[in-house]
Image: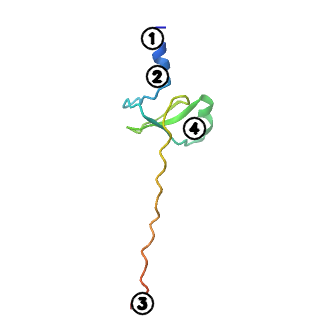
Amino acid sequence: MAKNSPDQIWFQKCLEFHCDDCGSETGFRSRRRSFFERYLLPIFLLQPVRCADCFRRDYRLLFVPVKERLPEPIKKVATPAPRPNRNVA
């Protein structure tokens, strides 16, 4: 097989993440949203992936190396300011 044969290029493209919109090489796992994504995609060895640069969401093979999802930021619940203990008429 030649060094850059069409078969090798196709195989390499399937095992590396490249965004179809912006061409970025960085992708993250995306949260599975529906019944289809939770139960049917794994049967076809697919996973939802999001581009790190343009945020386009797509499906890729489970074998494509992508980064884990970023941790969710902890949301602080706003606490009301303490009231002074005084009677105002």
Residue shown at the point (49%, 42%) measured from the top left: 69
Query: Disc 1 residue type?
Result: Ser
Q: Which label was assigned to residue 87? A: 3
Q: CA distance from mark 3 to mark 2?
A: 73 Å
Q: Are marks 2 and 4 in contact (CB under 8 Å)?
A: no
Task: Describe the element under mark 4 as helix, strand or loop.
Answer: helix
Q: Which residue is mark 2?
A: 13
Name the N-terminal-most of marks 1 and 2.
1
- Local SS, label 2: helix
Residue wearing tag 1: 5
Q: Is residue 5 above or below residue 79?
A: above
Q: Earlier in the sequence, mark 3 or mark 1?
A: 1
Residue 8, x across and y down, in percent: 48, 15
Residue at the image position 46 percent from the left and 22 percent from the top = 13
Spatial CA span between label 2 and label 4: 23 Å
Q: Circle 4 sits on which residue? A: 37
Which of the two residues, 55 or 76, is positioned nearer the viewer here?
76
Residue at position x 61%, y 34% from top?
Answer: 40
Residue placed furthest toward the top:
1
- Between the residue at mark 1 and the residue at mark 2, the CA separation in whole angstroms equals 12 Å
Give how far apart the Cα atoms at labels 3 and 4 are. 59 Å
Residue 23 place in picture, x, y as percent: 38, 29
